[in-house]
Image (cartoon, rainbow, N blue to C red):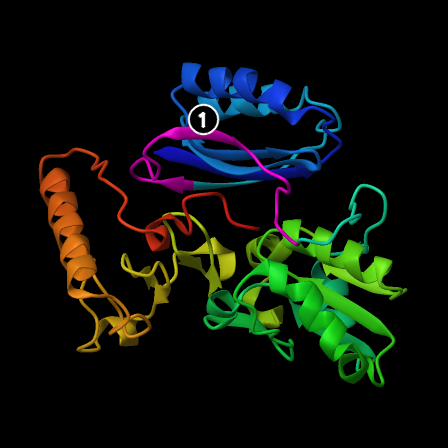
Amino acid sequence: MIRVCALYRFASFPDPAALRQPLLDVAEANGIRGTLLLAKEGINGTVAGTHDAIEALLGHIRTLPGCTDLDYKDSTAETMPFHRMKVRLKREIVSMGVEGIDPTREVGTYVAGEEWNALIADPDTLLIDTRNDYEVAIGSFDGAIDPGTKSFRDFPGWFRENRDELMAGKSKVAMFCTGGIRCEKATAFLKAEGVADVFHLDGGILKYLETMPEERSRWNGECFVFDARVAVGHGLAQGSHGLCHGCRMPVSPEDRASPLYVEGVSCPACHGTRDAERLAAYAERHRQEQLAAARGQAHVGARYTSDDDMRDEPQPL
């Protein structure tokens, strides 16, 4: 069984480039694959390998400045979910595009479990889902506002444009995301915008689904995850959604029953948006993947378009 580890830490890295090669060396020496992002604001990534290999990598990351209390979340996969190991330098470890936002300096209040249930049930609380539209579509908390964003970079503009309407009659703001990283930045942003009482779900949706008994849960649906599981439910049980290999969007059982769904090629969400050449490339990729699987091999194929790369990097937790 392969250990899949999603991790992040906001920390001050004055020279992230100097950290890149030692990090890559440790990962490659231990047979780890995946992607890690380094920026002046910290580290973010998802990697996979044996249990001991991941422990070795986590041990190295904990030696980096400010990373002693590294936040990570484990899952498992039957086969290696990544083709290669990459360590990339970025401007931000989760892209918001607002200068001066620093979660290590100011951030919202962490709230977990039963306290979260009470907070979001309070009529004075504005509850915001900070994830993107395709994630919200398959599950969210009761009463949460969906910003309808395509990218986390759209969140600041959405909040500024709608602030007066959103905050009318509300004294508190509670926000949540998959694993916590977007919430840390979103709460730091709201603090910088002058919102005083800001809270976020400690450990994100994944921790909530892992620890909250379903009979007391205020979560509806499934939670999209950026790994081989695609989606999970309560207890982090495997969800019912798959992934369209054409547009990389989650597909439900109903989607897969649609005549617009072609395995490995397209789904109802992207049907009619690709030209014949692109569709043929997707179909050939799928055929090669099936042949490799039949031989018990991992398929490492060419990447065809920027659409294929949209989730090649670790996505915001």
> Which residue occupies 49% across, 26% down?
54
The residue pinned by badge 1 equals 51
Q: Position of residue 95 (x, y in %)?
A: 61, 50
Inspect the image, locate mark 1, and give the three-letter code of the amino acid beneath it. His
Q: Report which quarter residue 270 is drawn in.
A: bottom left
Give, as a single range, the part of the protein colored magenta. Answer: 76-96
Q: Report which quarter residue 278 is drawn in.
A: bottom left
Instruction: Determine whether, in the image, residue 231 is placed left or right of residue 295.
Output: right
Viewer-proximal residue among 56 and 186: 186
Q: Position of residue 229 (x, y in %)?
A: 38, 52
81 in the magenta segment: yes
Instruction: Determine whether, in the image, residue 46 is placed left or right of residue 204.
Output: left
Q: Report which quarter residue 44 is drawn in.
A: top right
In this view, 7 is above or below 260: above
In this view, 63 is above or below 225: above
> Which residue occupies 67% across, 72% down?
158
Viewer-proximal residue among 16 and 235: 16
